[in-house]
């Protein structure tokens, strides 16, 4: 049965460039920290296991693959603390396809790989776009994943809403100049589709960029609920199913059924143990 509330954590991190093992160990420590705060879902920034520097990917060690042993420390922490963690990586699929990916670590030991659909700039030279991925089931809540520019494309969130998403969870890099853009993207996705919107952004700086920080959560009415500063942080937010459903019901009564009428059947869902 779906739970009435869901505690979501966002980790605003600054990666050790190209060092998957060190960043995985840091992620595992944050899994324990988020679990101590009661979180059931923990989001990390885009490419959190290596950092956003596309020049790094000339080095094969900056990529992760299926059953990569460097991920074991995160997998073990997730199993011990029984939460779902979403970490960012450059991922090489068994068929050789290269994705900017969210690696979904599940309490049952499985890893689901979700790829970025909307690439930009030099990313297109290094990676292939992914197709439409399934939703995640976290304690009965349906969660759609987005990677950075995905959230800037209205159709991406529309697909998620049509599939029945209740949470739209992003992993991103928004720079200092893009702070307003980030707020508009996630507030609009939340309000337009009556979903909670979540983003984990990078902290710090990288080649040619300075992050605006600001990781956090938006209510389905578009209001900001939590907001990090610019440095490393770990924030939690309690999502209320009752508040979500009340808005969807109100929209339906007013003749705007898009929030209340999204289906919950017929779409692939990655369950809690998968």
Image (tube, grey):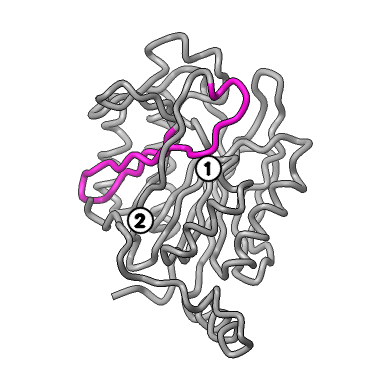
Q: Residue furthest bottom?
A: 253
Disc 1, SS:
strand
Above or below for 54 versus 233: above
For disc 1, the marked residue is 171
Label 1 crowd (10 A; few <14 / some 14-19 / many >=20): many
**Residue occupying the point 52% across, 41% down:** 147
Indicate which disc, 2 or 1, sits on the residue closer to the N terminus.
Answer: 2
Q: Which residue is mark 2?
A: 136
CA gap between label 2 and label 1 equals 15 Å
* Region rendered in magenta: 101-124
Choose between 147 and 211: the one closer to the eye: 147
Q: Position of residue 60 (x, y in %)?
A: 38, 11
Circle number at residue 64: none
Question: In the rendered image, which quarter is residue 179 located in?
Answer: top right
Residue at figure coordinates x 50%, y 78% from the top left: 260
Residue 54 position, x and y percent, is 55, 18
Residue 248 vs 231, above or below: the answer is below
Point 57% across, 70% down: residue? 194
């Amino acid at each position: 049965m779906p739970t009435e509330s869901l505690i979501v954590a966002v980790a605003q991190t600054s990666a050790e460039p190209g060092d998957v093992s060190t960043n995985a160990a840091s992620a595992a420590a944050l899994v324990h920290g988020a679990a101590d705060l009661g979180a059931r879902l923990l989001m990390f920034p885009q490419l959190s296991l290596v950092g956003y520097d596309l020049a790094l990917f000339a080095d094969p060690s900056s990529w992760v693959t299926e059953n990569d042993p460097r991920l074991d420390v995160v997998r073990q922490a997730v199993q011990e603390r029984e939460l779902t963690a979403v970490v960012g990586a450059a991922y090489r699929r068994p068929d050789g396809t290269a994705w900017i990916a969210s690696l979904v670590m599940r309490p049952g030991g499985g890893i689901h790989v979700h790829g970025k659909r909307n690439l930009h700039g030099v990313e297109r030279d290094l990676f292939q776009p992914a197709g439409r991925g399934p939703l995640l089931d976290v304690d009965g809540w349906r969660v759609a994943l987005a990677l950075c520019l995905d959230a800037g494309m209205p159709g991406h969130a529309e697909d998620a809403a049509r599939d029945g998403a209740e949470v739209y969870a992003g992993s991103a890099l928004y720079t200092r100049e893009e702070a307003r853009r980030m707020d508009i993207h996630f507030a609009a996705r939340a309000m337009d589709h009556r979903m909670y919107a979540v983003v984990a952004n990078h902290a710090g700086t990288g080649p040619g960029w300075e992050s605006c920080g600001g990781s956090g959560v938006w209510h389905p009415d578009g209001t900001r609920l939590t907001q990090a500063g610019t440095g490393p942080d770990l924030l939690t937010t309690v999502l209320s199913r009752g508040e979500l459903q009340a808005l969807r019901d109100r929209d339906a009564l007013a003749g705007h059924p898009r929030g209340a009428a999204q289906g919950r059947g017929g779409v692939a869902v990655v369950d809690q143990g998968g």
